[in-house]
Amino acid sequence: MAKDFNSQKVVERYDDHIRRLIPGYALMHQQVDAILQTALSADAEILIVGCGTGYELEYLLNRHPTWTFTAVDPSLSMLQKAQALIQQLGQSERVQFIHGETAALSTQPKFDAALSILVAHFVPYSLKPTFFAEISQRLKAGGLLMTYDLMACDNPQQFKALPLLCQSNGLSIEQSEAMMERLAQDFFTVSYDAYQQLLQHTGFEQVHCFSQVLTYQGLIAQKKQDDILTSEHSGKVVFTEQGIQH
């Protein structure tokens, strides 16, 4: 059964648990930050889709005092914890928090970059095209998208290695076993090729991998300069575990 991200118990344990659950969690955020620095100007506006409890917000706010952010999350409990964290930092004026989905934002293409970290693997296959098209709509031409997700695994050795790596990261044997049991229930994973195809169909180009730890993989892409795709059109796309169906 999927975790309830509106549960206060889940939210309070999230920050500690995620570091044990996701191998290389801190390093992945460092990579995202390093890449953003190479691409963005001092006055960049960044969209964070699924901001969770605010870890990446805190990290980027502390390192880049002139960047501004819009953070969206469908979980009110998660969003409120992130808001409290940013308020404690005294940085609330630099972040606009939105309870809901990306669709709740203006369609004006105002963002220089968008981050979707450990989010899209929870999005059902039929909704993935709309999910990414709505992000694309709100990015400036040439804007950067960075994602990091659990991917479909066709390598049995990597699949067997994942719980062992998580155990070395601090997860108990019982927790790692529960994690493996939940993979097929909670996540809508796709292969790298299908993910690349999906992004290319929803307004992105130059799709590449920037990071991988076993079955977790990060992708980077740019919004097409001449993209006219709308989320309404993208919603007609049939996307399955295998990719776009024509």
Image (cartoon, grey):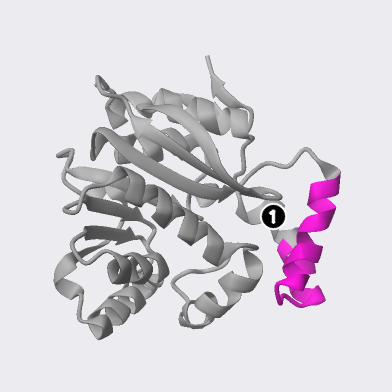
| Residue located farthest toward the bottom when viewing the structure as drawn | 88
Which quadrant of the figure contains the N terminus? bottom right
Q: Tell me where residue 50 appears, x and y as whole percent.
A: 39, 58
User: Does the magenta segment cover residue 170?
Assistant: yes
- Residue 209 can be seen, yes or no: yes
Q: Tell me where residue 73 appears, x and y as whole percent.
A: 35, 61
Count of numbered marks: 1
Q: In the drawing, does residue 141 fall left or right of residue 76?
A: left
Q: Tell me where residue 86 appears, x and y as whole percent.
A: 27, 77
Toward the viewer: 59 or 71?
A: 59
The amino acid at mark 1 is Leu
Q: Residue at x 56, y 49 (%)?
A: 149
Q: In the drawing, does residue 220 fall left or right of residue 225?
A: right
Q: Tell me where residue 99 appears, x and y as whole percent.
A: 27, 63
User: Does the magenta segment cover residue 115?
Assistant: no
What element does badge 1 sit on?
helix
For disc 1, the neighbor class at 10 Å (few under 14, some 14 to 19, many from 20) is some
Q: Mark 1 points at which residue?
A: 183
Q: Which residue is drawn at 57% across and 70% down?
A: 18
Answer above or below: position of 187 versus 74: above
Q: Quadrant of residue 228?
A: top left
Q: Quadrant of residue 84?
A: bottom left
| Residue located farthest toward the front when viewing the structure as drawn | 38
Answer above or below: position of 141 versus 87: above
- Residue 52 can be seen, yes or no: no
Stretch of the chain drawn in magenta: 157-179
Toward the viewer: 111 or 152?
A: 111
Answer above or below: position of 170 versus 73: below
Q: Which residue is drawn at 40% across and 65% down?
A: 56
Q: In which quarter of the image is residue 169?
A: bottom right
Q: Residue at x 67, y 54 (%)?
A: 185
